[in-house]
Amino acid sequence: MTGHFDNREQFTEMKSAGKLFPYARHVNTVCNDKINNIPAGEDKNTFSYASMKNVEYSDLKRSEKFTPALYQEKDGVWEGGSVSQFTPVMTFRLWERFSETCLEVSESMEVNGKKTFGYDVPVIYKRERGA
């Protein structure tokens, strides 16, 4: 899913209700042409970042901290995420839902089972007009 998204609508609703909530933009773009020397059989369709500079494939490293996020498609909507154990007491949770018009993201960090970062509802990014 590529495009430019923001949560302006959700931000305005939360602000009107007197709730503290972030305004955020989310930009997904393809940068396949910025990855040099990918070995035969590898797929550069998994890379996307607007300001990424050219990089050698051999310089890319898999993060040991993050558990890969797994997604399933149902009726044109993709949904999934992962749980990563950063340390024995620190857990990062990611859940995302992608549709043609909307991206929902829920991220949280827990230390000793207590949430230290994240919101009780997902951030709802809608596709920006003209983007």
Image (tube, helix red, strand yellow):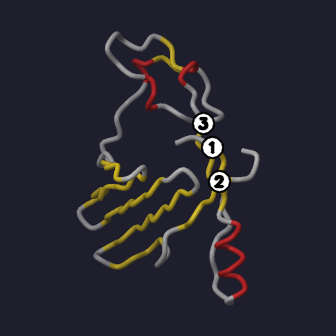
**Mark 1 = which residue?**
3
Whether residue 19 is situated above or below residue 80 in the rendered picture: below
Whether residue 35 sits left or right of residue 12 in the image: it is left
**Residue at image coords 44%, 23%:** 44
**Mark 2 = which residue?**
127
**Residue at image coords 66%, 56%:** 25
**Residue 76: x %, y % from top left:** 42, 49
In the image, which is nearer the foreground, mark 1 or mark 3?
Answer: 1
- Residue sticking out furthest to the left: 88
Mark-to-mark CA distance, 1 and 3: 6 Å
**Residue at image coords 36%, 12%:** 39
Whether residue 93 is situated above or below residue 77 in the rendered picture: below
Quadrant in the picture for the C terminus: top right
* Label 3, residues with CA under 10 Å away: few <14, some 14-19, many ≥20: some
Image marks 1 and 2: residues in contact by CB distance under 8 Å? yes
Mark-to-mark CA distance, 1 and 2: 7 Å
Q: Amino acid at mark 3?
A: Thr
Label 2 residue SS: strand
Whether residue 33 is situated above or below residue 125 in the rendered picture: above
Q: Amino acid at mark 2?
A: Arg
The label on residue 83 is none
- Residue sticking out furthest to the bottom: 18
Compare marks 3 and 2 and give the one earlier in the sequence.
3
Label 1 residue SS: strand
**Mark 3 = which residue?**
29
* Label 2, residues with CA under 10 Å away: few <14, some 14-19, many ≥20: many
Whether residue 119 sits left or right of residue 94 in the image: it is right
